[in-house]
Image (cartoon, rainbow, N blue to C red):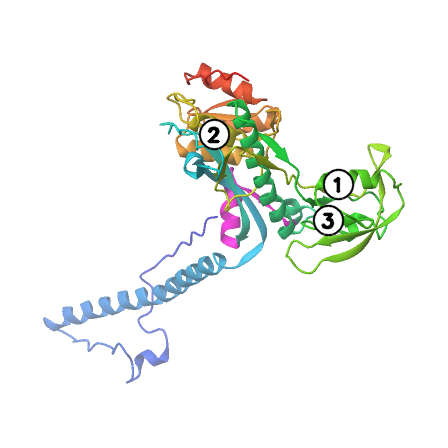
Amino acid sequence: MDDNTDITVTDSVPLVTSPSLSSSSDVWPAPQVQPSGAHGSDAVDDVSVLRRRLCRERFAIPLVTISWLIILTVVVSSVIRIERWEVAPGEALTVSDRIDVNAKEGGEKAPERFKPKNRIRFVTAFAGQLTALDAFVGWIDPHVQVDTFVEHFGEQDPADQRQIAFQSMFGAQQVAEYVAFSRLGYDATFSQGAAVVEEPLCLENPDPLSACKVLNVGDTITSLDGKPVNKLTDISPIMAARAAGDVVDITVQPRDGSKKQNKKVKLIANPDDAAQTLVGFTPADTRTVDLPIEVTIATSDIGGPSAGLAFTLALLDELSPGELMGKRKVAATGTINEDGEVGAIGALVQKAVAVRDSGATVFLVPKDQSEDEIKAAKKAAGSGVRIVAVGTLDEALHVLDELGGDPLPRINT
């Protein structure tokens, strides 16, 4: 936006612009003009000086006012938040600094750790409500996505979305530990967790007693149809004797830790299999991995499951000799399941920019991303970053091996 104003000053500016300037109280008294002699030229000079000073004052006051208005506008727009949210490039952070491995009491001793020189990075994207100034900057930045409330949150409440994101990060850590330690020959198993509502399932024209109208994100189901529910798998045998349309009593523990609540829920048929009856919610992955040693990955400040692949590779690199990344600075993004399959993630373009800014030269991304997403990510990252799509952990390890990384040691299982 251009705010150019042309100001023209001519010699015809009057000496006196208002009656007050000629009165005895004038700030700038009129000079005494000498009719002749040497003092006459001095009088003319005084008139010229006065004329220039009046011109400067005439235009200086509006310019100062405009400058202050601009400053005030910038300050106010940088403070007031508006109904816009961003998805912006975040950071490419090393995983190794967040890993802690210790012996369990009465269990195996902690394994030796091999600190890699080129530590793999996981990648984040920033998301948050914008000020007016931030929104303006975001609109002109090709790598920042500015959303309305509906575009950013959809039908979810922001608090619900945060709950889902942090639960997903916890699940991603557990799966990464399971996959990595199984690959290294350790005895790793899953234990089922509580039945936590990640997202209520809403069908078209839901009944007032449907789960999507009654249950909330983060609710933990503690009993169903009068029977205790200690873990998620306790629900299936109870549901076997029920049909779609039945109304059951459900007790839930709200996520805020408040008093348990008793609710009535009308069961529904599975939209993909009418013979199966559902309560009507997507459960959170609350499984925990059982290992002979204690592993912690500190991610209390980050949400979402997209670091699964990076966590898995970092654990493999930390607990095996050699440099899995070779001499390359590598970043990775992608979910991972217990079979080692890599899944798609969001904000790929923004994460590609974060990788570029971190100095990493290789970026492993999920093969499940669309061609357009990968193409846009390559453009955003620039020629200095090689983006490679992988579909499994084995494919990721193969890429690293081709790039000069040390292979994992053979494990007899």
Chain part drawn in magenta: 132-149
**Which element carries disc 1, helix, strand or loop?**
helix
> What mark, if any, has residue 315 been given in the picture?
2
Q: Which residue is mark 3?
A: 221
Image quadrant where residue 341 sits: top right
Q: Residue at x 25, y 69 (%)?
A: 50
Query: 400 and 196: which one is in front?
Result: 196
47 over 143 or under it: above or below? below
Q: Position of residue 291 (x, y in %)?
A: 54, 33
Q: Is-magenta flag for residue 209?
A: no
Q: Residue at x 83, y 43 (%)?
A: 204
Query: 347 and 43: which one is in front?
Result: 347
Image quadrant where residue 166 sits: top right
At label 3, which amino acid type do we have?
A: Ile
Q: Which residue is mark 1?
A: 234
Q: Residue at x 81, y 38 (%)?
A: 237
Please tell me whether mark 1 or mark 3 is closer to you in this view. Answer: 1
Image quadrant where residue 83 sits: bottom right
**Which element carries disc 2, helix, strand or loop?**
helix
The answer to which of marks 1 and 3 sits earlier in the sequence is 3
Q: Position of residue 207 (x, y in %)?
A: 86, 49
At label 2, which amino acid type do we have?
A: Leu
Density class for disc 1 (Cα within 10 Å; few <14, some 14-19, many ≥20) is some
